[in-house]
Amino acid sequence: MLSVLIWLPLVGALAVAVAPRALSKTLGMGVALVTLVLGVVVAVRYEVDGGMQLTETHTWIEAFGVHYALGVDGLGLLLVLLTVALVPLVLAAEWFTADDAKGAGARSFVAWTLALEALSLAVFCATDVFLFYVVFEATLVPAYFLVGGFGRDGRSAAATKFLMFQLAGGLILLASVIGLYVVSAEQGDPSYLLSDLMALDIGTDAGRWLFFGFFIAFAIKAPLFPLHTWLADTTEKATPGTSVLLVCVLDKIGTFGMLRFCLGIFPEASEWATPLVITLALISIVYGALIAIGQDDMLRLIGLTSLSHFGFITLGIFALSSQGSTGAILYMVNHGIGTAALFLAAGYIYHRRGTMSIRELRGLEKATPVLAGVFLVAGLATLGLPGLSPFVSEFLVLVSAFDYAWWVGAIAVTAVVLAAIYVLWMYERTMTGPTAVEVEKDAKDLGPREVGAVAPLLVALVLFGFYPAPLLDVANPFTDELLAHVGVEDDAPDVPADVPHAETEGDH
Amino acid sequence: MPDFGKPTIEYVELIPLFVVFGAACLGVLVEAFLPRETRRVPQVLVTLVGLAGALGATIYVATDVDKHADGAARGLVGAEGSIIVDGPTLYLWGLVLVFGILGTALFAERRLEGGLSAFAGQAAALPGTEAERIAATKGLDHTEVYPLLLFSIGGMLLFPASGDLLTMFVALEVLSLPLYLLCGLARRRRLLSQEAAMKYFLLGAFSSGFFLYGAALVYGYAGSVSLSDIDQAVREGTADHTLLLVGIALLAVGLLFKVGAAPFQAWTPDVYQGAPTAVTAFMSAATKVAAFGALLRLFYVAFDAERWSWQPMLAVVAIVTMLLGAVLAVAQTDVKRMLAYSAIAHTGFLLTGVIGAQGSGELGDNQYTSLEGVLFYLTTYGFASVGAFALLTVVRDAGGEATGGSSWSGLGKRSPLVAGAFAFFMLSMAGIPLTSGFVGKWAVFTSAMSAGFWWVVLPAITASIIAVFFYIRQIRLMFFSEPDPDGAAAVTEPSLLTTGTVAICLAATLVLGIVPGPVLDLVVGAGEFIR
């Protein structure tokens, strides 16, 4: 089942690559939609509370103890669904811009996008560390060609910077993956299966070194201060569609990896490293928001808000409490939806006005009211307005932060204010004010295709804002299991336990 | 007068050697008796049939080798102890022969130079003279390259199979001398080519001297040149330990020169650049295979008990080699030179594997040995290297092969297939997953880590990160740069010989990256060296 889900877009990518150019987009969209249906089927067959399921295990490279092993749990399922849902929307939003004469052509855009989808799905489903590493690195190839082949001038330098950062992180991760093999081989048959590795008895020192290899790679991916510098350049030069794939899907691998591998394989080292990680997360949260305020380029600004958001996610993960972990998982999904909407809306503005400079944009609200509305809702989601889904996750993470230490919560909460500043100020400068004459004449409002590409995202934002229960139901069992494995229990509430509150009521 | 006994020769097991050397002699006869114009086709046929026959014989022998007396290894000691046909030998033979066949195909390519081969029309004619011009207009061709290639391959087969230091030395010379000649035979940029040959010869001769001196010292220590007797002597620990250490060091100089490890790497970029690209392609893969085979046999068999004294030396050499290769490659603007420096970096990665865990005490159950790791890496690197150099021959401008940096810019738009294939080889050399280079890199790093050499693996990771930079730069140049208005290179349509070679290398690089299992099983099945 999962194999089909992964291989279908990959085969689709090959098919698009060899099919005639005229068919590329239709064929690609078809494959993406079928993959979406498959993703929904996986979700329907998934049993809440079932742990790792739909598993497949085949020996792949026997000499290295490597398996082709797949499976989904709550965390994996949510990210799989996010991925399969975003890809068709990206293809729809970039339908005409993919043909841009300056780019590498629609065929290669569609093919690389599908390849990226397939490899990302494999990352979220892999339950063998070697397989995970292989697909983790392999995602970079399509991502590199997407960044380098499409977007604004200077993109090839941005693509190189992106790739260098990611590959450097990947090679550091390689050292740790090799270290795991050595530890595993010392204790019997070498095996890379996640379940075998979680049962390993890793020495304290070795565990901490290996943890750092994993953590640095994921901190580059996520990204986390001070390894974030590739993010803004990449989102600025790439097309908004590519940025959606990168920031909303690919970067989630970083936080996904922290939950699954850092906490899963090195619980002791993770607990030991919390002070450092939380400090970095806090710096990311505040610093990302502050420099986002000062940006002039809209895509750069949105990229940097993600730095702040990824700080929140990391904070939630390493607060090591059930609210924190659940909040972080929800945050990953909600950030994916909200930021995707924001990127796509920014892309629509770019196609109309040909610039992303906030200073040059003015008064779009009157000419294109629907676009302005979409932009506003996406922006409000980003700043965590109650009633939209990011609020729920941000609230949970903040609760866990205050639980961890009051000052951590106090610092993190400032970002809520800063987020309001960067979103609303950007909206004010770009959408309100006097409308230029040529804008009034030329700028068309969103067409049905463009609305269709963002509408599902907006619906999801509102739906999960009022009714987050489905997400919580999927995330909670995963969180419980993970925290039990790490060996942390939530602090009991500070209410004196011997007050016979419930009992007295029950007696009546 | 001493008794003179008739030596026993295991003719069946040594067939691959006989076939290759026989074909080489036949090539010389063809050269002597056929008129110049008609020699080419018979020469190519003799070479290909010889190599394919030898490959078939190797496979036949490999399916039928018995366990050796000591139980750990398979194979036999042949030719009174001078030639050892064991699992690793057979695997290396197969590898050298495959690269030999691919090399022959590149040698025989004639469509790229407008109906001429890539070799000089008349090597004796001085560059720039009337004689050279006449040779060029007559369309003369040196067909001697085929027998030279065969002799060199014969030496490469013998080198890793040598059972004593003298045979090893003879093999070293047999493989080197034809290569020196081949390097100097380029049709274009002849002065560069001749300079390369001269440098290679002088430095090579010098390093052979070191090797011979080392062999003499070790003989003085052990009283024998046979590897197994040396092993015995080292285990017993005779007096005069210094003699042994100096001997090991001098032997190492000779071998490290051949593999191109620092500080003996200086010849590599000049020779790789100056030699005809077909020769470079063959040499970069096959010489490395043969020389690493010999290096492994020497250190693992003869000096195994002295492991603790040579391991740190090779570790330092490995670190210096890969960092030097990677850093200097960044500074290159010429593609061919860049590949040469990257070859140096790969030598360092291979040495990382050589120092890895080998003894049974160091390994867990079912863990593969460092020997197996290095053999696998040689396979993966060889295919990527032959493929990449083969592609260099087809990207040309008016002056022949265009290797200067900027002439490749925008190639991805003009010839997406060639650029894509080259990018794929670059990714494999950079060690990106789903290519063979990744699995190879993983294998050698893991053996080093298992032996506790984390301080070698960390520089290796650093060198890999640096190396990624220049591989990616090449990909970026091909796909995302605008073509250079004056002097953009174009792809010349090659014949099936080059296309086929590239296709085989591509397939091997892809398949070994996705399903390395079968080849790894083959490597594991090869087992240990016979002591």
Image (cartoon, coloured by chain):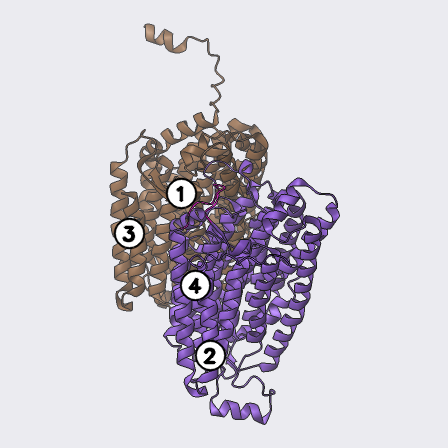
Chain colours: A brown, B purple
Horizontally, residue A376 falls left or right of residue B137, namely: left
Badge 1 density bin: few <14, some 14–19, many ≥20, Cα 10 Å: some
Q: Secondary structure at mark 3?
A: helix
Q: Which residue is mark 4?
A: B98
Q: Which of the numbered marks, if any, corresponds to residue A62?
A: 1
- Number of the front mark, 4 or 1: 4
| Mark 3 residue crowding within 10 angstroms, few (<14) / some (14–19) / many (20+) | many
**Identity, as a three-letter code, of the amino acid under mark 1:** Glu
Dot 3: chain letter: A
Q: How far from the left and from the top, in percent, is residue B477?
A: 50, 68
Mark 3 — residue?
A8
Would you say residue B66 sits in the magenta stretch? yes
State how far apart marks 2 and 4 are (Cα).
25 Å
Which mark is first along the chain, 4 or 2? Answer: 2
Predominant secondary structure, magenta span: loop
Labels 2 & 4 near each other (Cβ < 8 A)? no
As for residue B455 lying within the magenta part, the answer is: no
